[in-house]
Amino acid sequence: MASRILSDELLRAIRDRAAAHDKANDFFDDDLAELKAAGYLAALVPESMGGPGLGLQDLVHEQARLAGAAPATALGVNMHHVWTGVARFLHDRGDSSMDWLLREALAGEVFAFGYSEAGNDLVLLGSRTQARPDGEGGYTFHGRKIFTSNSPGWTRLGTMGLDEEAGVIVHAFITRDGGGVEILDDWDTIGMRASQSRTTVLDGAHAPADRVMRKVAPGPTLDPYVLGIFTSFELLTASVYAGIADRALELAVETVRTRMSMKTGKAYAQAPDIRWRIASAALAQDGVWPQFDQAAAAIDAGQNLGAAWFRQTAGIKVRATETARYVVDEAIRSSGGSTYFNRSELGRLYRDVLAGIFHPSDDESAHATVAQSLLGPIE
Ligand SMILES: Cc1cc2nc3c(=O)[nH]c(=O)nc-3n(C[C@H](O)[C@H](O)[C@H](O)COP(=O)(O)OP(=O)(O)OC[C@H]3O[C@@H](n4cnc5c(N)ncnc54)[C@H](O)[C@@H]3O)c2cc1C
């Protein structure tokens, strides 16, 4: 069984293009084509279905390597992997209802994750988008999704909306060529620019009955589909930021070996305070990977922790993204003012790493999850 797909050569090519995509604020279509050709989009498809059969533990490491080359590419592709992760989560637990998605990923379809909505801090547990029944078991969707990464590249969009009459949240998939979708050209951010996470306006986008995956009551749930989204999203998204931190540390080590001090006549790598900074960043980052490995291996092994998954994976996401910010910060302080120029890779990582704090679970929601697990719900 494969545990790696991305060759060093492919990662080098992707890294070489990352600065240009960032500067032009355009989509990583060349990276996407090469990742697809390498079979990366089918990474999680089991061998029994003709795929390479990577596990989630393998994929978090691959995503981190990709993020070390091009963070925005890794974040965009991440949203595709979140869906293959959900399908695999269910498949490994004897539920074949999303095997179609694994087959489509193998056939080259590209998935995106159209869930976020303006002002919806209920995230998976509520929706401002309307899901209207089509009378045949399917739904049309009407609403506005924000920050849809991979916007120029997706062919299938996983989304959700509220069926107001039935009082259920409908999780379903629409296709780009099925119509009823407008993608706005409104992505101009300080970081993660090539992810092109544009606004998606749904105005009648149709999901037929066989692409309606779940109808769940709003509010907390242990539905395996929702659990699959949560665990897959938290770990895979966090791995992108862990990859940024790994790369920042690598760059800082390289830089301080050649950055010379006039005061001492030696490289900064010999300066005790710089050594302390770099060691301090590494000490923090060293604590991150064992957490990924433990949780992802448990998911791959089919373990079921029920509600405890929420606390565990939200915790990893917050610790990994906050640690990544700290590591990039220390890397920049060690490497000096040259990183303040737009041409600097570390400067770009500094902009990209900030996005980590906005993804679910954000700091507030992770704290609420942990508090709830310790103290019960707020009365
Ligand atoms: C780089 C990046 C990529 C992302 N990719 C994806 C993705 O692929 N799929 C996905 O689903 N999510 C994605 N997200 C979205 C992310 O998970 C958050 O949902 C998003 O960052 C919004 O965060 P917020 O609620 O803190 O933003 P806020 O700034 O609080 O709100 C976002 C917008 O909504 C408006 N708003 C806030 N409250 C209301 C209200 N009550 N009524 C009307 N408008 C309101 C704000 O004015 C603002 O324009 C991505 C985020 C980033 C940063």
Image (tube, grey):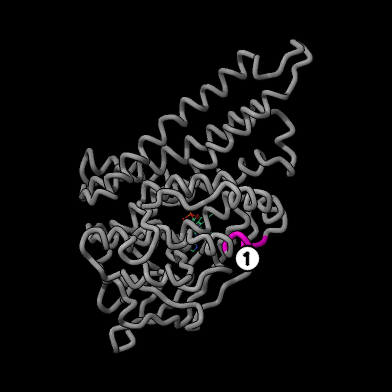
Q: Residue at x 31, y 39 (%)?
A: 294
Relative side of 314 to 259, left or right: left
Q: Quick check: 340 above or below 71?
A: above
In the current view of this chain or complex, which residue is farthest to the top? 264
Q: Which residue is mark 1?
A: 186
Q: Position of residue 108 (x, y in %)?
A: 48, 70
Residue 265: image location, x then y, percent? 76, 12
Dot 1 lies on which element?
Answer: loop
In percent of width and height, residue 46 lies at: 33, 60
| Residue 269 horizontal side relative to residue 97, left or right | right
- For the residue pair 119 and 278, the one nearer the viewer reads as 278
Residue at far right of view:
262
Residue at the image position 33 percent from the left and 46 percent from the top: 296
Residue at x 57% of width, y 49% of height: 71
Q: Which residue type does callout 1 highlight?
A: Asp
Q: Percent position (x, y) of residue 105?
A: 43, 68
Magenta region includes residue 363: no
Quadrant of the image occupied by residue 37: bottom right
Tell me: residue 251, above or below residue 60.
Answer: above
Range shown magenta: 26-32
